[in-house]
Amino acid sequence: MMGVNEAGTGIGAMMSDNRNGAVEIAGAGPAGLAAAITLARAGRSVIVHEARAEVGHRFKRDLQGLENWSTQQDALAVLQELGITTDFKRVPCRRGTAFDAWDSPYAIESIEPLFYLVERGSGPDTLDTALLRQARELGVQVHFKSRLRHARGPAILATGPKAADAIAVGYHFDTSMPDGFWAICDNNLAPKGYAYLLVMGGKGTVKSCMFTGFRDEAKYVERTVSAFQRLAGMEMMNPQPHGGVGNFRIPVTALSGVHPVAGEQAGFQDTLWGFGMRAAITSGVLAARSLLHGDDYNRLWRESLERPMAAALVNRAFYGLLGNRGYRWCMRRQENHLDAREFLRRLYRPTLARHLLAPLAGLHLRSQRRDISCNHVDCSCVWCRHGRELHT
């Protein structure tokens, strides 16, 4: 593989030869905007190309979790150290409830926030809007309805998922429920995944996050809605259907030619639970730093992201094999711990066993990506390679 410091050919040389030219970034998601912010803070001129008409278009005010268990340091402090804004609406989540396939509840409690509930999309208080605002305040040019087709100078690619390794399908809605989170681990609702209900500020998101069985998504969503109405007293007003996809892998290289690839386009997402915002933002910052300092981007992301991603990959393969009785066993173990945050952190801790099992886990999950059961005729799937969510 070509080193980025090779004279006249690598990213570092390209950057030094184009110090007065703008760095171009494909994609205005968290990875792309984090890269733009990092470059602009260092005095570089930056142009971001976003194919959609607005920031966060595909999320449509989806509620998501900014995970806070993979490091000892709080996620907000990590963002601040990276130079990334935390000026977005959020709710710290310390207590919630999970259910097994037999409707038994399990308390989820942590001393520090387990994750932060945030809103995605183009609304005034969303994470995406906060990143866009910070980028623009630093002088970044953001061109909407614009695609970067040819990079003639230094560039970073961060255009989002290219395939569906998992899907999350359900509804956004208004509700009078209090802020909180609920989850159900049941293959009858979310095959090899989990169903979740998130509520923040009178808005709710309910979804089935499934890792297989995509063709029957409507059936699983109906079951998920019914289960949360029964178990959590879910109240939905003005429900709007919504679906999203997750694309995760540990890449051999996160370079396209000499250009760094960040976020979900590279596969940087938590394979176990599907949380991806922190990995996306971190990879965007590292991609920018590789341009600024002529560093090897592959080395940077491997040092920061590869070990927890490998642990998550092994845990995902294990979780997928457990079945409903195994999920119940895991929830009972979690409930016996005083701190759910510490329990989850242990799952992401690099160990020799997880390192050795990672290649086998990767082979197992690769086979799941061949679960292509759509015939692509008049296709409206959110999950397949022909789906509108992936290509428009």
Image (cartoon, rainbow, N blue to C red):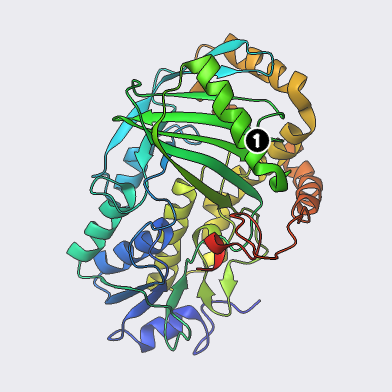
Taking depth in this image into account, of 353 and 237 the one nearest to the observer is 237
For residue 9, side relative to residue 2 (left or right): left
Q: Position of residue 33 (x, y in %)?
A: 35, 62
Name the residue located 56 percent from the left edge and 43 percent from the top edge: 169
Quick check: 305 above or below 52? above
Tag 1's secondary structure? helix
Identify residue for label 1: 220
For residue 356, side relative to residue 183 (left or right): right
Q: Quadrant of residue 146?
A: bottom left
Q: Position of residue 294 (x, y in %)?
A: 44, 74
Q: Position of residue 264 (x, y in %)?
A: 54, 58
Is residue 211 visible in the rendered structure shown here? no
Name the residue located 77 percent from the left edge and 54 percent from the top edge: 373
Q: Position of residue 30 (x, y in %)?
A: 40, 56
Q: Amino acid at mark 1?
A: Tyr
For residue 314, side relative to residue 49 (left or right): right
The residue most toward the left is 137
Quick check: 26 above or below 59? below
Is residue 333 visible in the rendered structure shown here? yes
